Image (cartoon, coloured by chain):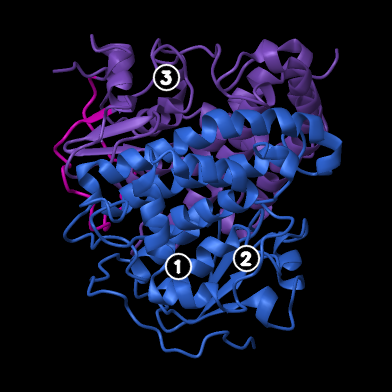
Chain colours: A purple, B blue
Amino acid sequence: MATSTRSSKRQKTDGSTETDPTAGTGAEDSYRLIYWPGMPGRGEHIRLAFEATGTPYTDVSNATDEGVNAVLAQISDKNLGDETNPPPLAPPILQHGAVLLSQTPNILSYLGLRLGLVPDPSEDPAGLYHVNALTLTALDGLSNEPHDVHHPIASGAYYEEQKDEAKRKAADYRAVRLPKFLGYFERVLKGPASGGGQYLYGGKLTYADLVLFQTLDGVSFAFPRRVRRLRETGEYDAVWGLYERVKGLEKVSAYLASERRKPYSMGIYRHYPELDDEE
Amino acid sequence: MATSTRSSKRQKTDGSTETDPTAGTGAEDSYRLIYWPGMPGRGEHIRLAFEATGTPYTDVSNATDEGVNAVLAQISDKNLGDETNPPPLAPPILQHGAVLLSQTPNILSYLGLRLGLVPDPSEDPAGLYHVNALTLTALDGLSNEPHDVHHPIASGAYYEEQKDEAKRKAADYRAVRLPKFLGYFERVLKGPASGGGQYLYGGKLTYADLVLFQTLDGVSFAFPRRVRRLRETGEYDAVWGLYERVKGLEKVSAYLASERRKPYSMGIYRHYPELDDEE
């Protein structure tokens, strides 16, 4: 049995009612995150949902003796899943009682209602779908694309084998794609559905804000010069305002200062100076 | 006011109960799909959900005078959305009453409960999340990656400007990535959660099956030689069995034979002989 990495009791962050018919099922079960050890990666989005809401969870690879074997057993070619769970292709994987789920935005969708990180559906029936759309868009342009910048040809080959192509793709990412996505989220924050521009949707923290924070943080690590220049233009002040706002939330801030937050290394976000702007 | 492209009445495909708290809201409203005209693209996944269930909808760009302007108005840099809907970054966009949603897997998630294309949550609370995960994985490896094969460097530049890189990426896709994803779905179908191997999850048609059908169809168009060889190995017979099964469903078959089904052209799936296996 794994040891929880958190000692605090589970708590709701706001008074939202869980009206999802599936919420409450297995509410007594603990949450286990199965992801590669030692790096933020895609698992970081799941960690932040737990951390920002003070929800106890076990980060299996980082905090138990199972280590990386927990991941390898799940993604083995021999794993056919079980009676109720298809096998996952890749981590992150969430285990909650008998339920085993993969795919980052899917896990967040499952957790959103349970952790109070989407609008109450009885008040705003479409809210959780808007949060999901914003999340998918942030992951597309600020997580998947930055990964593909350093691996434009083959995700299974070394960076050094595709460095020339990576330089070409990085130039396009810095000049076209990154400003496009920052501009999009600036527009979302300036739109009325944001509920005042403090958060992406409905004037309250949702998991889409946590995802945008984390992807902006990763992009800032990977392309520090480019990001500094884009910030200095002032064109994306609402976006960077959200970034600082989420970073400063008490529970998020405490998490970021803890040993549970792993440093960026050879994951999605990599800092290769030759892929960033020149000095 | 747009004219519906379908004359049949809305009907449920099975006896599933809609227990989603948000389902039923606006059930009297018509569905409008806003997508680029004249091509299947990502909009095809939404069309197939409607077509397979006999649900009336309006394919705005293809079937009304609004044409492509319906798309351009939504994705304009000037669009800030409205009080309840953030602006979308890109099509497909679903309009359902006052609700406007973007992102293919998100729209499918919204439609899944409403059209009976996910398991009844009162019987299988986690089922819709499994369907969502399978959908996201099919879109990752069999839609997004095939697009990136012909545009590995810059999605906004011409194929001819990145043809050499495309050839390198195509070689990896054909040898590594495509077999990986086919093998994964073969494993899902052989796993017990598929409920017999006829469909991906729970022994019944879900929108994940429709997505897998459409992505396999697109990959077969883009890489006909490679796909023929992979089919001939016999290693993915369950996958191709599902493909043929979905293709042969009465409503799907009628749709594919209709003028509402657009030919592949310069969209996600493109046939460049130099990116396929040699003869």
User: Which chain letter matches label 3?
Assistant: A
Q: Secondary structure at mark 2?
A: loop
Identify the residue position indicated by label 1 in the image.
B49
Work out whether residue B249 or residue A128 is closer to the camera in this orientation and state it: B249
10 Å neighbourhood of mark 2: few (<14), some, or many (≥20)? some
Identify the residue position indicated by label 3 in the image.
A254
10 Å neighbourhood of mark 3: few (<14), some, or many (≥20)? some
Q: In the rendered image of this protein, does residue A262 appear above or below residue A165?
A: above
Q: Secondary structure at mark 3?
A: helix
Work out whether residue A47 or residue B253 is closer to the camera in this orientation and state it: B253
Q: In the rendered image of this protein, does residue B197 appear above or below residue B57?
A: above
Q: Amino acid at mark 3?
A: Ala
Tag 3 and tag 2 share a subunit: no
Identify the residue position indicated by label 2 in the image.
B82
Q: Specify which label sits upstream in the sequence, 2 or 1.
A: 1
Q: What residue range appears in magenta?
A: A7-32
Label 1 and label 3: CA atoms lie apart by 45 Å
